[in-house]
Image: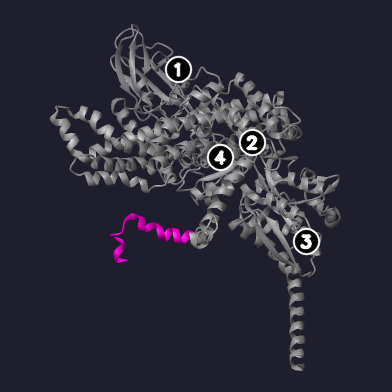
Amino acid sequence: MRHINNVGLIAAGAVVVLAVGACGGSSGNGSSSPATTQIGGSATLWAEWTSTEQQDFLASLAPFESQSGVTINYSGKGNNTDTAIASAVAGGAPPDVALVPDPATVQTLASKGSIKPLDSILGNLTSNYGSAWNQLVTANGKLYGVWFKGANKNTIWYNPAEFNAAGITSPPATWEDLIKDTATLKAAGIAPFSLCTDIGWPMADFWQNVYLKTAGAQAYNALAAHTTKWTDPTVTTAFTTFGQLVGDPTNLAGGLQGSLANNYPECVDKVFPKPGAQPQAAMVFEGDFVTSEITANSSNYTGGTTGAGGAACTTDASKTPCYNFFNFPAPAADSANQGAVQGAGDVAIMLNDTPQSEALIKYLAGPQGASIWAHLGGFASPNNKVPSSSYPDSVTQADAKALVNATGFVFSLDDLQGTWEKNMWQDMLDFLRNPSSSNITAIQARMEQQATTGLGH
Amino acid sequence: MIGTEVQPTGAVTPAAAKGSKAEGGGGGWRSHLGSLAFLAPGAIWLGAITIYPLIATVRNSLYDASATNFVGLANYKAIFTTATILTTFRNNVIWVVVFPLLVTFVGLVYAVLSERIRWSTAFKTIIFVPIVFSATASALIWRSIFDLDPHIGVVNAAIQTASDWFNPPGLYPVDTSAGQSVARLASTGVAPGPGGNLQSTTSVSAGDTVELGLIGVSPTTLSTLGAQSAIEPSSSQKDITGLVWRDFSPANPSARGVVQSDEVGLPGLQLSLLASDGSTAGTATTDAHGDFRFTNVGGGSFRVQIDPHNFQSGFTGTFWLGTQSLTPTSGLNRTEQALFNVPLVDVAMIIAYLWIWAGFAMVVIGAGLAALDRDVLEAARIDGAGEWATFRRVTMPMLSPVLIVVLVTMLINVLKIFDIIINMAPGSSQEEAQTLAVVMYNSGFSGLGNWGLASAIAVILFILVVPAMVSNLRRIRG
C-alpha cells in the first residue's frame, strides 16, 4: 500500500507539473485573450454546425479546452437549433452554452429569464463588438449574447475579367453607378446579371437589400415586425428601384426565361463557370456563402482582382480566373445607409451559470477562437479584435471588415415572416414576371394581406 | 381418416361443433386464443403505424399550426379559399384526368404492337425497364432532357438542329426572346431599318468611305471570328469602301463615334448596297479588320445595309419546365387563372412519369390480350369484321376489366404524386406545378410546421383516394 501511495503521489505531482507547464505554454499564444486558469469540469455546448463546420468549430475551441481544462461536450443541431433549445429549456435540461442563429430567439429566452445577462462576466470585452451588434442582443438594458460568427448577405459578386473587358476599373459605389455599369457591360456585349430565382428566396434577399439601402435599418426592422405596412411608399420605392435592374430583361443573362430557369447554385455557375465553359454574365447577387460554390467549380479561382501569382484575371476557368465582390450600393441620395448590412450570424448565450460556462463565454468573446476558424476559411467574425491577417485572402478580409464596421446590422427579413415567408418569395417572382407599376400596387396589397394573416397582426 | 372422402359433407361439422361446444358458454373466445396470439403483434403494429396516426391526423386537422389550439374547420376553410390551393387542386385534376387515360392508352398501343412485331421481347424489355427507376431518378433525367439550354437539353438541341438546317443563325445572333433587339446594336452611322436590318444614316456614292459602328457585340464572338483591330479604309474612285467596327473601347468605355486604337473590326458581316429605289446594287462581306468594298458602283447615291440574317439567332430554347399556360388565360384574374391554367411544366412531368409506367400498363394489358379467347376473334373475322372493327367491338369490350384495373391503379398512384414535382419543376415553377401531396409536405415538414393545414390536406387526400381503393378492392374480391 505504501508503495502504491508513493507512486500515486509522484503521479499526481507529475500531472500538476505538466498542467502548469501546459498552462504556461499556451497562455503565451493568445496575447489578447484573458488568461484562463485551470478550472476543469465540463460544459455542454450546442450549436447548429455539423460535419466540416463542426470540425472547424471544435478546432477553434481546442485552445480553450487545454488552457482551462474544461471538457466541452458539443452537439450539433443543424437547422433545428432553435427548436431543440426551446424544447430543452421547457424540459428543464438546457445546455450550459449555446450558439443560436437568430437574435429573436435571444430576445424570447431573455424575456423568459432562461438565459443569464453577461455584462458583469464580460466586463470590457463588450467593446469587442460594434454597438449595432450588441444592440441586437440587448434586452431591458442588459447584454445577453456574444457574436461568434457572422455572414454577409450584402455582397454582389463579379467576375473581374469581365469587368476588365468592359473597361470598368473600379466596382460601383452607388446604385446609380451600378446602373451605369450595367449599361457599359451591355455596350461591351456582356450580360450584366445572372439572376437567381429558385423558389424566390434569392429574389427576396435582393429586394431586402434594396429596401435596406433605400429606407435604412430602422425602417427595415419596422417592416420586418410589420409595424410598417407593406403598402407603405418606402416599399413601392424599393420595388421601383429594384425594377430598374431586373425589370429590363436585357440586363439579365437569358432574359426573363433564362432567369426563371435559374435555380441556386446554377446562377452562380453562369458567372464563375467550371473549366471549359465561358461566363454568361458578369455579376451575381447572393450572400458570402457563394464562395464555396465558386471554389468548388474550380480550385483555380482566386479571390481578389488578380489571379494566382499576380497574373491578370481570365475568363478561362482552367487558367487564372478570379472572383471578387463589392458591397451592395445605396442610391447616392441614401448614402447614410451605405454602412447598413443585411446578414446572418451565430450568437453565444449562457443558459446555466457555472464557472465553466462563464469561462467559455469569455473565450468566445475573445478573438482567439474566431481567428482559428478564420484561417480555415468559410468564416467571418464581427469581432473587431480578430486581426485581418487571420483571413486567408483579400475577399474574406473585406467581407469581415464590412461586418465589423456595420453601422446597422439586420437579419434576413423573410426568415422573420413565419408562415407567410413562402408567399413572400412567390410575390417576388410575380414581380419579376411583371414589373409594371400596376402590378407593384397589386403585389403590395397582396403582401399586406398575407402578412396580416401570417403574422397575426 | 381413410373414410373421410366417402363421408358426406356433413361429416365436417361434428369437429367444429365439438370445438365450439367444448368450452361451453356463448362466445367460445378461448378457442380463438391461439389465433389471437398470432394476430396480436401484427394488429398492434398496424394500430400503431396506421390507425393511431390516422386518428391523430384527423384530430390535428381541427387544430392550429402547432397542434395545440382547437380551431375547428378553419384549416379546411383556408384550403378552399387560398388561390395557391386552388392551383393545387387544379394540378391534381389535370394529373388524375390526363395521366391514367394516357398511360392506359399508351400501354394498350404498346401491348397490341408487341403482339405483331417479331422482336417483341426486346421491345417489351425496352418499354418495361424504366419501371425500375424511382420517380426521383426519372425527374432528374427528364429535367436534364427538357433543359432550357440547347447545350444541355436534348429536346431543345434537337429542335435547334432542325431549325438551324432551315434557318441558319447568323454570326452575330441577337436573342429577341431574351429581350434583345437589333436596334440596340446601332451606335455610329447606322440606324435600324425595316425588316430587322441596320442601314447607314447617310447616303454614299462612288469614291466615298463610310464608317459604321456597332455596340453590344460580345468579346467571345469577336475572338471566335478572329476580329482584328479596326483599320480605317482608304477611298477608291469608282468604289464605295467602308468599315464596320465595334464601337467600344475598354480603355475608354464611354467614348463613341471615333475609331479608338483598341477597337476591333467586325468580320464576316454581309452587307448590301441599296440604290435609291430600294433595289440591291451589290453585296460585300467585311474582312478581319472590318473593312469592305463595293466595286464599280456606278452613279447615283446609295445606302449601305447590314443584312438582317447576320443577326438571326435561330432557335434558342423553349422553357419546357416553365409556367406558360397551354390554355389562353392571360386575360383572366388570379383566381380564374389558378383554375384554368395548364402550365407547360405539367406536360413535361406527365411525360416523365409516363416513361416509368407505360411498361407496367403494357405488361398488364398484354397479359389480358394473351388471355383473350381466340375463338371469339376468329368468329368475328369469319363474320367479315375488319381489323379496326374487330378491335373496337370485340377486343376492347373483352379487355375492359383489365383496362379498368390499370386505370384505377394508376389513378390511385397519381393522386399522391409528389416526387416528380419536387425534383423536376425548377424553383420558379414549383408553385404553379404543386399538387396536394407537395403542399402537405411543404406545410408540415419543411421548416414552417403548419401541422393543422398539413393534416387537413392529408385528410382531404385520404377522402379522395377512398372511393378508388374501395372500387379496386371490390373488383379484386370479385
Task: Name the kind of residue labelled 1 in the image.
Answer: Gly
**What is the x, y in percent for residue A103?**
74, 45
Q: Please tell me if label 4 and label 3 are on a single chain.
A: no
**Which residue, given by chain and number where applicable, does mark 1 sit on?**
B189
Q: Who's the residue at 24% across and 33% down the image?
A: B395
Q: Which residue is mark 2?
A: A421
State the predominant SS element of the stretch in magenta: helix
- What span is in magenta? B1-20
Measured Cα–Cα span from mark 2 to mark 3: 36 Å
**Can the viewer see residue B392?**
yes
Residue occupied by mark 3? A357
Quadrant (top left, top right, bottom left, bottom right) of the C terminus of chain B: top left
Q: Tell me the amino acid under the disc marked 2.
A: Glu
Eye-nearest disc, 2 or 3? 2
- Residue B347 locus on image (x, y percent): 41, 32
Q: Amino acid at mark 3?
A: Ser
Mark sitting on residue B458: 4
